[in-house]
Image (cartoon, rainbow, N blue to C red):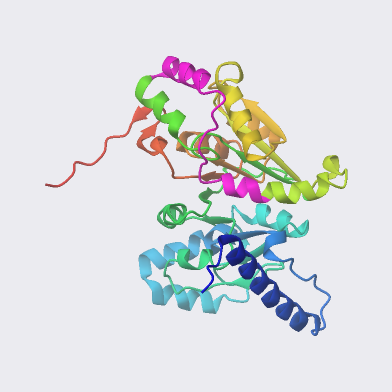
Amino acid sequence: MSEMKPSDVAAAEDSSEEQDWNAAKTFFDSLKSNKPRPPKPRFAVSIAVSSRTLFNMVAERKIYEEEGVEKYVAFQVEHENEPLKPGPAFPFVKVGLRTSLFTHFQLAFNLSDLTIERFCMTGGKSPIGYLEAYMTNLYLSKDSDKVTEAIEAGIAAATVFMPEKESELSDTQLRVAFDGDAVLFSDESEIIVKQHGLDTFFEHEKHFENQPLAQGPLKCFLEALGKLQRKFYSKNERLNCPIRTFLVTARSAASSGARVLKTLRSWGLEIDEALFLAGAPKGPLLQKIQPHIFFDDQMFHIEGAKDLGTIAAHVPYGIGQKYHKGKLIEQPAKKE
């Protein structure tokens, strides 16, 4: 019996996926509709968004927590024909769909004027097991436990927060801002800062300048965006690309910025704008960038961003979760 090589397995999987997609396309093409057909998942970005993240469901959540699930269900049925108000992820999803960048499914009912092709109702159970099957590039939720579960499963994920005030965001270009350490990159350098101080960190980054950082939980999402960007670059339409990415990091350009840029280059990835703040607050700069979403691993950066009107998403990953504003958070004593 001949042994099947990994490349043969991958080719077989691609062929099977192509056959499934062609069968689905034939079915959809037989239907009469003016709506655009969704692109193949491999040619778009698949975003999973919980209902509480896509819509403002503060009142509904209060009923669920204070009166129980049956009252919550009854309230939803009674008001099912009333459109929900936009939640924190709504602008991000809206511009992604409008510019045909995303295939999208939400994990609740579709009550908005968005072309959402897939949704998954889990009856209160965790949706994480379905994310891989949906070829998810990013999962956004209000539930930090589910976000952590997704990250541990190898899926880019973040907990999204509503800004304190509204900002005017672009309708034609998706603008996404990322922190570096513990978001795009691992927390290996941040561990050195927390445990040994800045001077040791600067020495470490200089010594390992040419050694790429390990990947962080959001690297795969930047990679997915980069694939779409390269389509425009190949047509000499870089300046007209409907995606713009930003790196907004507390690192200093002079003392620790080179390793970051070299790491991105080693991955074959680009960032449109890299902003090194050398410890300065991120909120005022984000206010100028006006991203549809900003990802960071530290809550004090999230709080500073949303206070000034930025939709911020917390990535609960790395050593930064044990600190707040540079101070170690007291951990509960372990039971014997």
Which residue lies most toward the left here? Answer: 336
Q: Quadrant of residue 36?
A: bottom right
* 210 or 44: nearer the viewer: 210
Question: Exactly how many numbered labels are in the figure?
Answer: 0
Q: Residue at x 56, y 48 (%)?
A: 162
In percent of width and height, residue 172 lies at 80, 50
* 245 or 260: nearer the viewer: 260
Question: Is 262 situated left or right of 124 in this image?
Answer: right
Which residue lies most toward the right here? Answer: 236
Question: Is 244 situated left or right of 80 in this image?
Answer: right
Question: Is 198 one of the magenta-colored residues?
Answer: yes
Question: Is 69 situated left or right of 307 in this image?
Answer: left
Whether residue 83 appears in this view of the structure is: no
In percent of width and height, residue 158 lies at 51, 50
In percent of width and height, residue 132 lies at 53, 64
Q: Report the span colored magenta.
A: 197-224
Q: Residue at x 73, y 54 (%)?
A: 95
* 130 or 147: nearer the viewer: 130
Q: Residue at x 44, y 32 (%)?
A: 188
* 65 or 20: nearer the viewer: 20
Q: Residue at x 61, y 54 (%)?
A: 89
Whether residue 41 appears in this view of the structure is: yes
Question: Is 195 situated left or right of 257 in this image?
Answer: left
Whether 83 is drawn above or below 153: the answer is below
Whether 326 is drawn above or below 245: the answer is above
Whether 69 is drawn above or below 143: the answer is below
Question: Is 280 one of the magenta-colored residues?
Answer: no
